[in-house]
Image: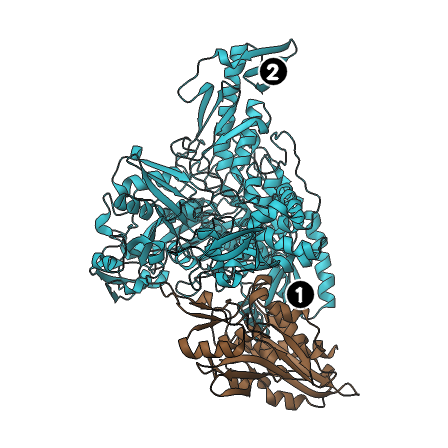
């Protein structure tokens, strides 16, 4: 029944073979009608502009963006959504299995659009070519997978996955994959009950402005709204943040706003009224003030100070020094230097921030997409001013995060609105609101000088990086700390100075984005390594191998790993393809005038977990009297596969098959804190906690049965059966006492990586482990048009131990796609590229074949030797591409994105010099 | 009010009576809606009799206002329409091509409208109808007056795009440049329609360029200059595109656009001539 009509719903819609009735309002989008009036929340909305394809449905068999179809037009037409197709279509049945077997669904929010579009293709062409798949899926964006596994799935190619018991090292399917493929999982905007009040946030239209709130309550009353929220409603601290001491972002700005998108007030009301509200009609007066929108003007004495105590808008600095870089540079046989720049990069997850909140028995419950439920809880405790025992955070499925969903977004507004009205409330950011208000990758401005001796060993390295941290700190301090530790790359550099600085501007807050500043510094360092090799007349790959870190050699922080350093193996794994691809590029270039091919290589490393700070994860498990094994898994799966990997590790440690495990969580009422999904820490840190929890549970069993470590366990039907050389030993679970949680046996274990603080020169043990990577890119540059077309990647990654090789590939593909976007097309310009048609991320047509080479140099701290991987994968991508462009054209691009216009200008400039 | 008239006369009187927002595919209408400004009245032209047809007869091709990009891709048309088909294939994505209309693309009057250069190269005309003044026909080049600005009067609907049959043997090609594959707004685009004589020399050529001026334009001076030339020997100079007035924006600089267009003309001409 339509909620928009007072009378009987009488327009007839034919949805998934059923006749349904609704009364759309004039111009209502079909997507909204399907989701809100007809309960089809399997239709996902990513942009409401036809730019992402998430809402694709079939209309009389043709794929369309439901967000662009007037609902009235669809009356009498045959509408098929993904769930309808899964129920009856033979091609959907095939896709369901192949998507699962290939791991083609990560966060899963694009999957409905992908599957619906694929069904339309397969009905026409049951065995499509790669080009036909790309043409058919070009309109559906995916930010996680890098598309290659989707192509493989639609082409129904053989997959690597196994339906095995899920031991560590098995490429099993995602344990939660089928729910995503069938569109049964619920994302941030899928959980609110029908008829919920909505929240509309009013945001600053200026980068910096003074403002005065008028009679907002009167305005709300006159428009039929339920309530208003402003800074006056913040009962706790009107500030939040993610780093202790840097909680500087207001829930609602007071008097002055610091960036376009700063929240000043919120309106709460029924959705049919909220949709008629133009925020600019609200009685708020603004005085537009001069704003500092770049790091240089922000540091001028004349610039307005964004935060008290941060002189010249410098938020914080970072520093690492070893040896004497100045002396070494003077001594060097050759030196190279360069100035490198990058812009804001938007995370561009397809699911905008969304959630709902309600008050239940005097407690506030917030259901929203997040990467960090416990941090959300602590943040809410701070701003709501209520004890955290009265707050419950229930993460929904997350339609991509990549770092930005670590910070609070919708949560405080939802919680305050629910508390103020006493009613359930919902909020889903529009695409533009999401892009304006959420955190970004830090723009960087890097000056780097590196020297080398005659033999090609690095002699002196001086790095100065300034990062635009935007209006608020967010994860800026983390970037400032991480960059000097990582700017060396995975190389032996004994004379090193690296300084970083985070500068506030009136731009959106820069925060965490896959790599925390390391991808930016890697562009400078890996580009100059190529330039150094060229000056020395050395092969760029061999030059890197000569300088690569090894077991027993100190990092620039003086940390010596006596095991687990796999960078050399990564580079060595590329030797053959490096030679082959360069030869084939030479051949191509000899035959082509306008198109030139190039091959580039770059390395990278990334320390897993927090930098020299405590970083624990806790995992709980238990066995019920009926023999059910329960894993309380609080490590947020944002598509990367934590649910699968953590469960595999736990199952291995306990010694059972993965199918026997029931997963619970994440939910702050039910799951212990497994920390945040960031810093490539979940496999390593939460994985270790899961391993310890699994082992502890195993020992609890073995002790009771009194059998040895090598006994085989079968758990189920109220009995544990342990088999060893002596035979079978049974433990009747019903004979054991049941605890308050319903367990007869249970375990809870924590793991915190061993690190040591950094001294004033940045010397210490910042991370317990690093992961290592080397990537090779082949590009074809149209030298007349300036377009760069990547045609191949080979990625060698040292993951210590691949807990699940298929998921490793998934991370590699996705990271490369994001690195490619950063290198070639993505730049967020506040006020200008605030949607998915002006802000371009790679489509299925932009990602070439990717070959993944898994290197397993076990790490002593990692669970079964495993290392983190999530961020590592995009660190080398951009510099590998830039080095390939250099090879192809002789042009060194020092600023990303290297859009065609810029590449053309660089080539043209060179030609006329 | 969501009006879905079945015939043109009914539609034209509705248009006169209630000043509704005219909507065809919706692919430009929805993305430009601003927060809080709900439109109350729509006139949906997709159910009007004959509007979803492409007809050809008497040497004239008529494209109805509800004809989508996908329709164009599926129908048999002479090679002179290849550029239009290639443009159709480059519009957004399959999803957009399935609902977006060519007439809507023209009415939206974006400088980056993918359909306009091929239609200019086809010498397309626009047929407008109103209930009071009947029908008028004007060249597409006169119909689009500026950015988001056309000659359509509030009481008029486009009732067809008309292409007087191109000379037999005329061939065409379209080039679009964007920063990525699929779903991309053109940095620059070029459509070329060309007829070669028996000696393989250019007898007649029409070159239209989009995204390089407020309204896509024909390069008449270059067209004249190319007449009688061997397409294999043609080079396109800076001076040939000097009449264009592209902007610097996030997609590319003006200087870049001009350089890219030179190359696009060269490539599309050669492709159209199959040399």
Q: Position of residue B30 (x, y in %)?
A: 46, 65
In which image quadrant can residue B53 be found?
A: bottom right
In the picture provided, is A493 more to the left or to the right than B237?
A: left
The residue at 45%/81% (across/down) is: B155
> Residue tagged by mark 1?
A596
Q: Residues within 10 Å of mark 2 (few under 14, many from 20)?
A: some
Q: Earlier in the sequence, mark 2 or mark 1?
A: 1
> Residue tagged by mark 2?
A711
For marks 2 and 1, give the CA distance.
61 Å
- Front residue of A5/A183: it is A5
Report which colour depicts chain A: cyan
Residue A656 visible to the viewer: yes
Q: Quadrant of the C terminus of chain A?
A: bottom right
Q: Residues within 10 Å of mark 1 (few under 14, many from 20)?
A: many
Residue A141 visible to the viewer: no
- Is A114 placed above or below A709 here? below
Both on one chain, marks 2 and 1? yes
Q: How many marks?
A: 2
The residue at 75%/77% (across/down) is: B275
Q: Position of residue A695 (x, y in %)?
A: 52, 22
As drawn, the chain in brown is B
Q: Position of residue A692 (x, y in %)?
A: 49, 25
In front: label 2 or label 1? 2
In the picture provided, is B109 more to the left or to the right than A255?
A: right
Q: Position of residue A813 (x, y in %)?
A: 59, 48
Please, which residue is most extreme toward the right here? Answer: B198
Say which chain tag 2 marks. Answer: A
Say which chain tag 1 marks. Answer: A
- Front residue of A211/A679: it is A211
């Amino acid at each position: 029944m339509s909620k928009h009509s007072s009378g009987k719903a009488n327009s007839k819609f034919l949805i998934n073979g059923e006749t349904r009735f609704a009364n759309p309002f004039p111009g209502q989008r079909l997507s909204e009608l399907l989701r809100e009036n007809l309960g089809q929340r399997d239709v996902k909305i990513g942009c409401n502009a036809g730019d992402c394809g998430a809402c694709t449905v079939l209309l009389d068999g043709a794929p369309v963006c439901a967000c662009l179809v007037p609902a009235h037009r669809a009356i009498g037409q045959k509408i098929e959504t993904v769930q309808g197709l899964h129920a009856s279509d033979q091609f959907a049945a095939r896709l369901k299995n192949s998507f699962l077997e290939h791991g083609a669904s990560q966060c899963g929010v694009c999957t409905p659009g992908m599957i619906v579009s694929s069904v339309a293709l397969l009905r026409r062409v049951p065995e499509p070519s790669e080009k036909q798949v790309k043409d058919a899926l070009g309109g559906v964006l995916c930010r996680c997978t890098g598309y290659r596994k989707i192509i493989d799935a639609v082409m129904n190619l053989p997959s690597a996955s196994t339906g095995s018991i899920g031991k560590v090292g098995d490429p099993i399917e995602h344990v939660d994959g089928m729910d995503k493929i069938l569109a049964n999982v619920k994302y941030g905007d899928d959980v609110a009950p029908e008829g919920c009040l909505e929240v509309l946030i009013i945001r600053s239209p200026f980068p910096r402005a003074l403002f005065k709130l008028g009679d907002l309550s009167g305005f709300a009353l006159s428009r039929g709204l339920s309530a208003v929220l402003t800074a006056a409603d913040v009962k706790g601290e009107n500030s939040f943040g993610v780093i202790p001491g840097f909680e500087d972002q207001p829930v609602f700005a007071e008097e002055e706003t610091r960036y376009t998108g700063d929240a000043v007030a919120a309106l709460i009301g029924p959705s049919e009224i909220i949709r008629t509200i133009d925020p600019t009609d609200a009685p708020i007066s603004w005085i537009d003030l001069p704003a500092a929108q770049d790091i240089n003007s922000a540091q001028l004495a004349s610039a307005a100070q964004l935060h008290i105590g941060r002189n010249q808008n410098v938020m914080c600095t970072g520093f690492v020094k070893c040896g004497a870089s100045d002396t070494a540079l003077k001594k060097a046989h050759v030196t190279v230097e360069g100035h490198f720049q990058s812009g804001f990069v938007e995370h561009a997850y397809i699911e905008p921030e969304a959630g709902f909140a309600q008050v239940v028995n005097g407690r506030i419950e917030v259901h929203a997409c997040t990467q960090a439920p416990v941090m959300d809880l602590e943040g809410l405790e701070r701003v709501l001013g209520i004890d955290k025992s009265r707050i419950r955070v229930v993460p929904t499925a997350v339609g991509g995060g990549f770092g930005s969903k670590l910070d609070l977004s919708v949560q405080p507004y939802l919680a305050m609105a629910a508390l103020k009205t006493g009613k359930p409330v919902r909020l889903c950011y529009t695409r533009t609101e999401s892009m304006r208000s959420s955190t970004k990758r830090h723009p960087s401005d890097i000056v780097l000088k590196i020297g080398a001796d005659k033999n090609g060993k690095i002699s002196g390295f001086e790095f100065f990086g300034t990062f635009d941290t935007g209006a608020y700190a967010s994860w800026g301090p983390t970037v400032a700390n991480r960059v000097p530790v990582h700017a060396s790359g995975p190389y032996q550099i004994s004379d090193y100075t690296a300084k970083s600085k985070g500068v506030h501007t009136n731009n959106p807050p820069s925060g965490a984005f896959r790599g925390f500043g390391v991808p930016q510094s890697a562009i400078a360092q890996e580009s100059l390594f190529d330039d150094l090799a060229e000056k020395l007349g050395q092969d760029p790959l061999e030059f890197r191998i000569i300088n690569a870190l090894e077991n027993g050699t100190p990092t620039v922080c003086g940390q010596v790993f006596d095991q687990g350093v796999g960078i050399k193996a990564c580079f060595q794994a590329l030797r053959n393809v490096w030679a082959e691809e360069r030869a084939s590029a030479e051949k191509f270039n000899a035959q082509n005038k306008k198109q030139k091919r190039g091959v580039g290589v770059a390395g990278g490393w990334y320390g897993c977990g927090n930098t020299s700070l405590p970083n624990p994860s806790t995992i709980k498990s238990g066995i019920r009297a009926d023999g059910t094994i329960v894993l309380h898994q609080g490590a947020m799966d944002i598509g990367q596969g934590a649910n699968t990997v953590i469960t595999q590790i736990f199952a291995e440690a306990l010694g059972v098959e993965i199918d026997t495990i029931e997963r619970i969580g994440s939910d702050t009422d039910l799951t212990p804190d497994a920390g945040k999904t960031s810093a490539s820490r979940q496999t390593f840190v939460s994985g270790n906690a899961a391993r310890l929890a699994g082992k502890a549970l195993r020992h609890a069993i073995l002790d009771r049965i009194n059998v040895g470590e090598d006994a085989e366990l079968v758990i189920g039907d109220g009995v544990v059966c342990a088999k060893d050389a002596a035979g079978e030993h049974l433990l009747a679970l019903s004979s054991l006492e049941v605890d308050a949680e319903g367990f007869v046996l249970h375990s809870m274990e924590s793991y915190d990586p061993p690190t040591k603080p950094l001294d004033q020169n940045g010397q210490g043990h910042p991370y317990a482990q690093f992961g290592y990577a080397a990537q090779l890119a082949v590009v074809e540059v149209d030298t007349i048009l300036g377009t760069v077309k990547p045609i191949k990647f080979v990625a060698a990654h040292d993951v210590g131990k691949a807990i699940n090789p298929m998921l490793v590939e998934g991370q590699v593909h996705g990271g490369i796609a994001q690195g490619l976007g950063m290198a070639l097309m993505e730049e967020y310009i506040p006020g200008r590229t605030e949607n998915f048609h002006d802000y371009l991320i790679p489509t299925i047509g932009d990602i070439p074949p990717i070959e993944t080479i898994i290197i397993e140099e076990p790490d002593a701290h990692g669970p079964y030797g495993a290392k983190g991987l999530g961020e590592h994968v995009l660190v080398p991508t951009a510099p590998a591409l830039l080095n390939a462009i250099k090879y192809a054209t002789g042009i060194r691009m020092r600023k990303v994105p290297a859009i065609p216009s810029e590449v053309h200008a660089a080539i043209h400039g060179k030609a006329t010099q | 009010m969501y009006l879905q008239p079945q015939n043109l006369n009914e539609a034209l009187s509705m248009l006169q009576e209630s000043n509704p927002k005219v909507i065809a595919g919706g692919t430009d209408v929805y993305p430009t809606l601003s927060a809080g400004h709900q439109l109350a009245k729509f006139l949906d032209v997709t159910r009007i009799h004959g509007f979803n047809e492409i007809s050809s007869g008497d040497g004239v091709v008529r494209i109805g206002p509800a004809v989508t990009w996908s329709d164009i891709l599926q129908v048999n048309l002479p090679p002179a329409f290849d550029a239009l088909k290639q443009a159709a294939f480059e519009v957004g994505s399959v999803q957009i091509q399935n609902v977006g209309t060519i007439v809507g693309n023209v009415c939206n009057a974006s400088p980056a409208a993918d359909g306009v250069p091929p239609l200019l190269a086809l010498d397309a005309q626009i047929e407008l109808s109103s209930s009071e003044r009947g029908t008028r026909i004007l060249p597409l080049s006169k119909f689009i007056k500026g950015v988001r600005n056309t000659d359509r009067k509030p009481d008029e609907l486009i009732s067809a795009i008309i292409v007087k049959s191109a000379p037999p043997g005329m061939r065409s090609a379209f080039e679009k440049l964007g920063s990525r594959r699929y779903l991309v707004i053109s940095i620059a685009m070029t459509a070329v329609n060309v007829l070669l004589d028996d000696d393989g020399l250019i007898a007649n050529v029409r070159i239209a360029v989009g995204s390089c001026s407020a309204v896509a334009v024909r390069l008449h001076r270059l067209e004249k200059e190319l007449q009688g030339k061997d397409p294999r020997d043609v080079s396109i100079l800076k001076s040939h595109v000097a009449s264009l007035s592209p902007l610097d924006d996030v997609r590319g600089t003006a200087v870049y656009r001009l350089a890219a267009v030179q190359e696009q003309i060269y490539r599309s001409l050669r492709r159209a001539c199959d040399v």
